[in-house]
Amino acid sequence: MHWLQKLQGSRLAIAGLVLAAILLVAVNVLANAAFRGTQVDLTQGRLYTLSEGTRRLMTSLEDPIQLRLYFSPRLGEVAPAYGAYYTRVRELLERYASLSGGRLTLELLQPEPYSDAEDRAVADGLQGVPLNQAGELGYFGLVGTNSVDGRAVIPFFNLEREPFLEYDLTKLVHGLAVIDRPALGLIDALPNDPMGAMAGTGAPPPIRVLEQIREFFTVETIDADVPVIPPKVRTLMITDFARLSTDALHAVDRFVHDGGRVLAFADPLVESAQAFRGEDEDATKGTAEDRAKLLRTWGIDVVAGKVAGDIDAARRVSTGARGGIGSYIAWMSLGRENFDEGDPVMANIERLNVATSGIIEPVPDNALTVTPLFWTGPRSMPLDAEKLRLVPDITGLLRDFQPGGKPLSLAVRVAGNAPLAFPQGEEANEPRPLQVIVVGDADMLYDRFWLQTTDFFGQRVEVPTAGNGDFVINALENLADADALIGLRGRGTSYRPFTLVDELRRDAEAQYRSKEQELQQRLKELEQQLQGVQQRGEGPAGELMLTADDKAAIERFRGEMLSVRRDLRNVQHALQSDIDRLQQQVKFVNIAAVPIVLCGIGGVVALVGRMRRTRAKRQSRG
């Protein structure tokens, strides 16, 4: 009987295990069907959460859009990362189709070698990548079409663009859905010579952000000498405010007074353009007095001859001296703590890179509302723009840096009522509402400050390291009342700074530069002393005759020099020690601390359970 009960218990245990396995499979199948595409996004930039702009676009589609997603299974076998990336792209597009209510359809194609799907992929303009030495190609791209023969293509989904997947997909759908784009006037006076760049003359290449603007607006190029802004233009972008002629300044004044919106870059030192225009060229344009008068009418001043420097936001660059690397306080990388995140223009922007930016201040006692959009940190100061022309002394700027203790505004939004700055004759000049955004830096538009470009089998892959392009398009869409698309920007950048390490490095480097200055001064004093001794002790035959006091002075200075060098080594060692200690702490938290905490919690739970069982046994015995 005992044997029979034992056998029956074993069968029940086996049956229980089989039932548990069936339930596990069933739960997974049901969860996969019921919660398909559901995610919990814990990433810093919320990379996997659809923006509100994407949702609005998909739910507002009126005409049908068809998407064809190509993916070669062999590509996923050769490079598993692309297989996982394909799953994410497919699931995201399926969510788009679900939100569209059937107006967006998705077709999945697998282009095998020599198949009709491969021929179709080639005809659609997709980029094939070699998978083996036999010449087999893999495809991973997207083609979209609309009802009026519009067509858009992503030739290949490069892994480097993954943080910007939603932006790329939504931009493609938006280009197919929105046919009538807002009109934008563009006064582009920055050097931007594609032919010169191709010829290798050193001329700046095309500015990518200006190409991106054309994906969202119908752009009308306007000359910097224009006497009247075209009537159909209601939003205007000026890349270099200093290059406007007197006539153009008057035209912009009247344009704003009549209700036009302006995004203007008023940079006192366009560092990227110095080598491509003459110093006297500005004399043919509007006078500095006219520019200042127009800006003061808008309630602001751009501090003349000054640019902003920030030691906390300084970018690390080559100093040009013995391959050294230093903090260039005039080139800044600004984070969220430097942004007005309540303004829609700053939506989804994590970082901005600016260079030799002007400082914008409100005019005292003006009735306009001047709101800063981004600014420096408190440890900043105005720098003399003349010291930064052509070849700036990076180490000297850091050595002489004296923080002012207050932030400096680099971009502002101006709203309120303002009169004409240049009224004509006896015309009435009553104040009218204006909407203007003024930015103190034009260098931020150039690709080298925010965009990295690589070649992927002949395809140009652009990976932003900052949100400069997003800021420009956000500002224009907001001014043009087309802010339904604000938020469709990239959800992250490839730049993830170690802020604590950077802060330690900057503080120690400032101390190092101070010691370096002391060493240089000591060396100069020693050279002067030696020169004096040589002149005093040079004999008739050219031999050097030194007194005991001269020798003692030389030895004293050598000892001081060695002492200062030792201090420099100590500062560098302390810097590296602090960084190493911080890295060890981070590694400990990531590798050991979490398992230790979990084990501790498990141990406490086990101990509490054991104590409860022991107490229960004692109570049952009692």
Image (cartoon, rainbow, N blue to C red):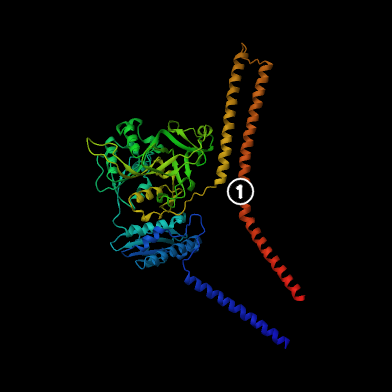
Q: Of residues 289 and 237, which is closer to you in this image?
A: 289
How far across and down, in percent of the image, does residue 122 sit?
Answer: 36, 61
Can residue 292 be seen from the camera position used here? yes
Type of the residue with mark 1:
Gln
What residue is pinned by disc 1?
Answer: 583
Q: Residue at x 67, y 19 (%)?
A: 551
Left/right placement of residue 544 relative to residue 364 reads right
How far across and down, in percent of the image, does residue 190 sit?
Answer: 35, 40
Name which quarter of the figure residue 442 lies in. Answer: top left
Can residue 127 be seen from the camera position used here? no
How far across and down, in percent of the image, does residue 178 sit?
Answer: 31, 58
Name which quarter of the figure residue 3 lies in. Answer: bottom right
Q: Of residues 488 and 189, which is closer to you in this image?
A: 488
Q: As drawn, which residue projects farthest toward the left?
A: 426
Q: Of residues 240 and 158, which is closer to you in this image?
A: 240
Q: Is residue 315 above or below residue 492?
A: above
Q: As drawn, which residue projects farthest toward the top?
A: 540
Task: Specify the quadrant that holds the C terminus.
Answer: bottom right
